[in-house]
C-alpha cells in the first residue's frame, strides 16, 4: 500500500469529490482517481459509492479513513521533526498566518516586529479577515496558522483557546455618561446603533437580541470594517459595538467614550488553529508562542481596567 495513495484517499474522503480533492492536492484528477481505484483493487473492496449525487464512503472506506489519518499525521510529524533536527536553531522557511481585524491592533504589529528581529530569514505573509474566514482558510490548508473561530467540524484542526474578548459600546459622545461606565443596551431607547452585518457572528447575534427586545435602538446601521465603523461615529452621537481589543489604543485618549456592556454581556472566543494533517514548522511554533504571550499581556491589561463581571455571559 503506497503512502501517496493513502494521502489521495484521505483527500477524496474529506472533500467527498475527486474534483475538489484534486484541486486541494494540486494534482490532475485522472491521476488521483487512478490511485484510489488501485487502492480499491489492492484491498479488494470499494471505498466509495459513486452516484450522480457524488461520493459516499462505504463501511470499508470509513474504517480505512479512521486508520489512515493517524498514519498520515505521524509521517508528517516525523518528516517535520527531522527537518527541525537538521536545521538546528536556524529558523527559516515560509509562514502564512491569518488573524482577525481586531487582533491586528495592539497584537499583530508588536509580534511581527519581535518575530522578524529574531528570525529574519522567515518569509512571512499575513491575511486579515473575519474569524470564520480565517478558520476556513486554515482548514483548506491556505494558512499555516490562524487565530479564528472554533470550527463546526474540528476533527482536522488543532484548536487552543487563544483569547477571550469583550464587546463594548463606543461613541465619540458621552451617550452613557463618563467613559468606562457600564451600559445596559436594553434601556438605551434613543440609541443609533452601528453593528456588523449578518456575515459576522456579532451581527447575527445582535440582530437576534434586537428582535427579542434585549437590545433597544432607535435605528440600526450595519457596517462591516473597523475603520468605517469608527469613522461613522467620530462626528455623530451614534454608538458602535466593537471588540475591546480593537479600541484598546483609544483608552488613554479623549476621542472616544468606551462603555463595557453589562446587559446583554457577550464575549468572543478566538482560537489558535493549525491543520493536524500538517504539523507546524519550527517557525510556526515560535510565532504561535510569541503570539500567545502577547495575547496574555493584552488580557492582563484589560483585567486591570475592567474586573470580571458577575453577570452571565453569552459566548460567540
Image (cartoon, rainbow, N blue to C red):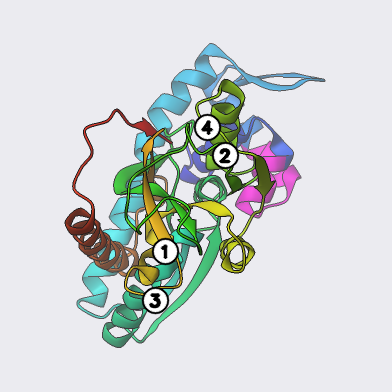
The first of marks 3 and 1 along the sequence is 3
Structural distance between the alpha carbons of marks 3 and 4: 35 Å
- Classify mark 4: helix, strand or loop: loop
| Disc 2/disc 1 C-alpha distance (Å) | 41 Å
**Which of 270 and 227 lies nearest the eye of the viewer?**
227
Q: Which residue lies furthest to the top in this view?
A: 59
* Mark 4 surroundings: few (<14), some (14-19) or many (≥20) residues within 10 A: many
Total tally of numbered discs in the picture: 4
Which residue is identified by label 4? Answer: 215
Magenta-drawn segment: 20-35
Nearer to me, 132 or 125:
132
Q: What element carries label 2?
A: helix
Of label 2 and label 1, which has the lower sequence position? Answer: 2
Q: Residue 247 carries which label?
A: 1
Q: Residues within 10 Å of mark 3 (few under 14, many from 20)?
A: few
Residue 254 visible somewhere in the drawing: yes
Q: Residues within 10 Å of mark 1 (few under 14, many from 20)?
A: some
Q: What element carries label 1?
A: helix
Residue at 68% over, 48% down:
221
Q: Position of residue 256 (x, y in %)?
A: 45, 66
Amino acid at each position: 500500500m503506497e503512502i501517496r495513495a493513502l494521502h489521495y484517499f484521505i483527500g477524496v474522503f474529506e472533500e467527498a469529490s475527486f474534483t475538489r480533492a484534486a484541486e486541494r492536492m494540486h494534482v490532475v484528477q485522472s491521476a488521483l482517481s487512478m490511485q484510489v481505484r488501485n487502492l480499491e483493487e489492492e484491498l479488494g473492496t470499494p471505498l466509495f459509492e459513486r452516484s450522480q449525487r457524488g461520493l459516499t464512503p462505504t463501511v470499508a472506506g470509513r474504517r480505512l479513513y479512521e486508520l489512515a489519518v493517524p498514519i498520515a499525521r505521524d509521517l508528517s510529524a516525523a518528516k517535520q521533526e527531522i527537518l527541525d533536527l537538521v536545521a538546528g536553531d536556524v529558523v527559516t522557511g515560509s509562514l502564512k498566518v491569518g488573524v482577525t481585524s481586531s487582533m491586528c491592533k495592539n497584537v499583530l504589529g508588536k509580534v511581527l516586529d519581535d518575530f522578524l528581529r529574531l528570525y529574519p530569514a522567515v518569509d512571512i505573509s499575513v491575511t486579515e479577515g473575519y474569524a470564520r474566514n480565517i478558520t476556513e482558510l486554515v482548514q483548506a490548508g491556505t494558512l499555516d496558522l490562524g487565530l479564528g473561530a472554533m470550527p463546526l467540524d474540528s476533527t482536522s484542526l488543532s484548536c487552543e483557546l487563544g483569547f477571550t474578548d469583550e464587546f463594548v459600546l463606543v461613541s465619540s459622545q458621552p451617550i452613557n455618561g463618563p467613559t468606562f461606565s457600564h451600559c445596559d443596551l436594553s434601556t438605551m431607547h434613543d440609541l443609533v446603533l452601528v453593528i456588523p452585518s449578518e456575515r459576522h457572528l456579532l451581527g447575527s447575534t445582535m440582530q437576534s437580541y434586537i428582535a427579542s427586545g434585549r437590545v433597544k435602538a432607535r435605528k440600526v446601521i450595519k457596517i462591516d470594517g473597523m475603520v468605517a465603523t469608527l469613522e461613522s461615529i467620530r462626528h455623530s452621537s451614534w454608538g458602535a459595538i466593537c471588540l475591546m481589543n480593537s479600541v484598546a489604543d483609544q483608552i488613554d485618549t479623549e476621542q472616544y467614550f468606551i462603555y463595557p456592556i453589562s446587559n446583554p454581556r457577550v464575549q468572543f472566543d478566538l482560537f489558535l488553529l493549525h491543520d493536524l494533517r500538517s504539523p507546524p514548522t519550527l517557525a510556526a511554533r515560535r510565532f504561535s508562542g510569541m503570539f500567545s504571550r502577547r495575547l496574555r499581556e493584552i488580557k492582563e491589561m484589560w483585567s486591570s481596567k475592567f474586573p470580571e463581571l458577575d453577570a452571565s455571559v453569552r459566548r460567540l
